[in-house]
Image: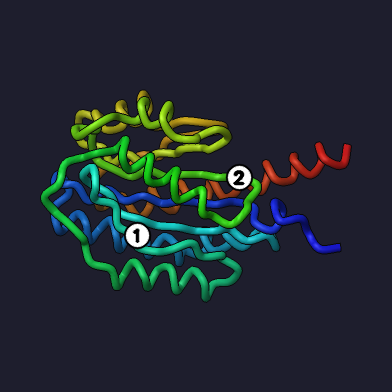
Amino acid sequence: MAAAPVEACRLALVLALDVSSSVDQAEDRLQRGGLAAALLAPEVQEAFLASPDPVALQIFEWSGKYNQTDLLNWTLIRSPADLLLAAEALTNSTRSVSDMPTAMGYALGYASIKLRTAPPCLFQTIDMAGDGANNDGFGPSSAYMAYPFDGVTVNGLAIAAPDNAARDYYLAEVVHGPNAFLEVAYGFTDFEDAMRRKLVRELSSQIIGRAQAREGAEG
């Protein structure tokens, strides 16, 4: 018997990259290239492909209130070739803007809207990466009240300065929902390693969650 639609995809994953004015061109290259490299890392590929049920992946960059640009539309990751295509899309992308503030609430709202068009999946996760606090428009707490986030996990990847202000802000304001967690990159040079750690952790946790959901359905 064919799997029910909700079982056909185990996770809808939205990755959001900060391209606000606090991120310079060199840092943007480290972030964009770091994500592309992380998607091709052997342990990340293994985590994506650990189940016959694929992950649906969407990637966008964000900065000001009305500055969200898709870098990868919803793509089912079924093979290493699919991850290679996603990595190539990032490698070939160019930054849309470089002089906008940090409208994190708007970015979260955009991610929530993207999840409405995702393939039917058992879990939904948003990953917010950034190096600072919201400074334009409404913040994360308002986004969580205004948009549908029921059952959605929002994990954070804080690119921390020496004072760890970004880490503290992400812990207090951004991380949200079931089993949410924060990963920290200690500077943009650490972004690739932090992204690898985060992807492996969240993809592995969804495998465990899917098995538990199946056991509950069969019990």
Q: Is residue 123 left or right of residue 213?
A: left
Q: Position of residue 134 (x, y in %)?
A: 24, 33
Classify mark 2: helix, strand or loop. Answer: strand
Under circle 1, the secondary element is strand
Tell me if residue 165 comes above or below residue 79 in the rendering.
Answer: above
- Viewer-closest of 56 and 149: 149
In which quarter of the view is residue 192 placed?
A: bottom left
Residue at the (23%, 67%) spot, across then down: 94
Question: Disc 2 designates what residue?
Answer: 123
Asked if residue 150 can be seen in this view, the reply is: yes
Q: Is residue 62 above or below residue 175?
A: below
- Label 1 neighbourhood size at 10 Å, few (<14), some (14-19), many (20+)? some
Q: CA distance from mark 2 to mark 1?
A: 21 Å
Residue that appears at 41% across and 60% down: 38
Residue for badge 1: 70
Q: Who is closer to the viewer here, 201 or 143?
A: 143
The residue positioned 17% from the left and 56% from the top of the image is 97
- The amino acid at mark 2 is Phe
Determine whether, in the image, residue 92 is placed left or right of residue 216.
left
Provide residue 122's location: percent of width, then percent of height: 65, 47
Which of the 4 quarters of the picture holds residue 60? bottom left
Question: Residue at coordinates 53% horizontally, 38% vertically from top-left?
Answer: 152
Quadrant (top left, top right, bottom left, bottom right) of the C terminus:
top right
Q: Could you tell whether 149 is left or right of 121 in the image?
A: left
The image quarter containing residue 76 is bottom right
Binning the other alpha carbons within 10 Å of mark 2 as few (below 14), some (14 to 19) or many (20 upward) gives some
Check residue 84 in the rendering and tell me which mark sits there, or answer none.
none
Residue 13: percent from left, percent from top: 50, 51
The numbered mark, 2 or 1, whose residue comes first in the sequence reads: 1
The amino acid sitting under disc 1 is Asp
